[in-house]
Image (cartoon, rainbow, N blue to C red):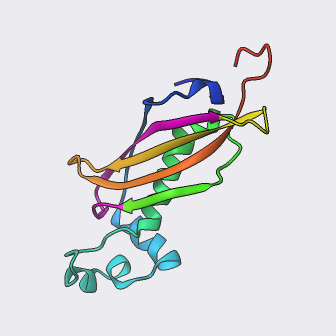
């Protein structure tokens, strides 16, 4: 993995493997109790009788896990200036306790800022799958990244 990511280091079609993370039912329930306490996220008995057949993670929990994987896998060593927002989030398949979430980052477009020469915009799609290769979630968004300093190696 690169030691520092600048805007110039991104190119269309670039894919980054962001690793994997095991997810327990206990952490699914704990997140949901605090942030999304719908019965199919927090109550085993109710969830068993739901269309999901068991406890599933909140989609927002899935997004939070993906964000952590992006930060650990790339953003901590990037010239990130944050994000102006997301264009889309899709929850494709439920995330369940015992699943191993795998994430990847695909650069879909890049554009240097015309008005602010110190930065550029990178559009990307983040995709998370489980250990069976089922697509769990996709996030389409954009990030602002600093340009490589003049004369800097980076």
Give the residue at x 29% y 73%.
55
In the image: residue 37, left or right of residue 86: left
The residue shown at (21%, 79%) is: 51
Residue 101 in view? no
Quadrant of the image occupied by residue 74: top right
Front residue of this view, candidates 44 and 138: 138
The image quadrant that residue 125 belongs to is top left
The reply to whether residue 91 is in sight is yes
Count all numbered tags in the image, as a single digit.
0
Q: Is residue 2 left or right of residue 92?
A: right
Q: In the image, residue 113 lies at what x, y percent? A: 71, 37
Q: Position of residue 10 (x, y in %)?
A: 55, 28
In the rendered image, the quadrant that contains the C terminus is: top right
Q: Position of residue 127 (x, y in %)?
A: 38, 47
Query: Where 66 sits versus 43, above or below?
Result: above
Front position in the image: 146 or 76: 146
Relative to 28, say whether 150 is above or below. above
- Asked whether residue 106 is drawn in magenta, I would say yes
Classified by dominant secondary structure, the portion drawn in magenta counts as strand
Magenta part of the chain:
91-111
Q: Is residue 69 magenta?
A: no
Residue at position x 76%, y 16% in the image: 152
Residue lying at the far front of the rendered structure: 114
Q: Residue at x 30, y 60 (%)?
A: 92
């Amino acid at each position: 993995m690169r030691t520092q990511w600048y805007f110039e280091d991104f190119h269309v079609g670039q894919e980054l493997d962001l690793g994997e993370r095991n997810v327990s039912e206990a952490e699914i329930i704990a997140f949901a109790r605090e942030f999304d306490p719908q019965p199919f996220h927090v109550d085993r008995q109710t969830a068993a009788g739901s269309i999901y057949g068991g406890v599933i993670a909140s989609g927002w929990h899935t997004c939070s896990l993906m964000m952590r994987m992006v930060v650990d896998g790339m953003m901590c060593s990037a010239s990130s200036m944050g994000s102006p927002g997301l264009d889309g989030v899709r929850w494709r398949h439920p995330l369940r306790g015992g699943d191993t979430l795998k994430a990847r980052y695909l650069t879909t477009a890049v554009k240097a800022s015309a008005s602010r020469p110190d930065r550029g915009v990178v559009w990307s799609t983040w995709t998370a799958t489980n250990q069976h290769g089922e697509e769990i979630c996709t996030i389409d968004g954009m990030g602002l990244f600093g340009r490589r300093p003049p004369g800097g190696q980076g």
